[in-house]
Amino acid sequence: MKLLISIVTYKSDINVLENIIRNLGTNKDYIISIFDNSSSQAISRISLKYNCYYFKSHNIGFGAGHNKNVEMIFRKFK
């Protein structure tokens, strides 16, 4: 069983987000999933660079973004 690290963003500073993901390192024991409430191209590129799962939408809120992350990852790894 893996740990899900759920990140919800809204117009986040791309440098801060990249530093967080880079500092987490590459570990097979967890999955990083990013839910982007602002649909940023820069955040999409960061998720590809670090092999994170990426979901985007209009701004549905912080809590709902985490719920969507969990829902989408659960569907993917059922």
Image: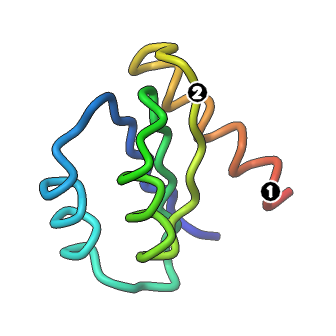
Up/down of 7 relative to 62, above or below: below
Q: Quadrant of the C terminus?
A: bottom right
Q: Secondary structure at mark 2?
A: loop
- Kind of residue at badge 2: Ser
Pinpoint residue 44: horizontal percent, then vertical percent: 47, 55
Pinpoint residue 63: horizontal percent, then vertical percent: 44, 19
Pinpoint residue 68: horizontal percent, then vertical percent: 62, 31
| Mark number, residue 12 | none
Residue at image point 70% right, 37% down: 71
Please state if 27 lies on the left or on the right of 18 as rendered: right
Instruction: Depth check: give the residue in front, 26 or 1.
Output: 26
Please state if 68 lies on the left or on the right of 24 as rendered: right
Up/down of 66 relative to 1, above or below: above
Q: How many marks?
A: 2
Specify the farthest residue to the right: 78
Q: Secondary structure at mark 1?
A: helix
Residue at image point 50% right, 27% down: 65
Quadrant of res 22: bottom left
Up/down of 19 relative to 55, above or below: below
Residue at image point 58% right, 27% down: 57
Q: Quadrant of the N terminus?
A: bottom right
Please state if 77 lies on the left or on the right of 54 as rendered: right
Residue receiving disc 1:
76
Instruction: Depth check: give the residue in front, 40 or 75.
Output: 40
Pinpoint residue 75: horizontal percent, then vertical percent: 82, 48
Distance between the alpha carbons at the discs numbered 1 and 2: 18 Å
Specify the farthest residue to the front: 41
- Kind of residue at badge 1: Lys
Residue at image point 16% right, 66% down: 19
Residue receiving disc 2:
57
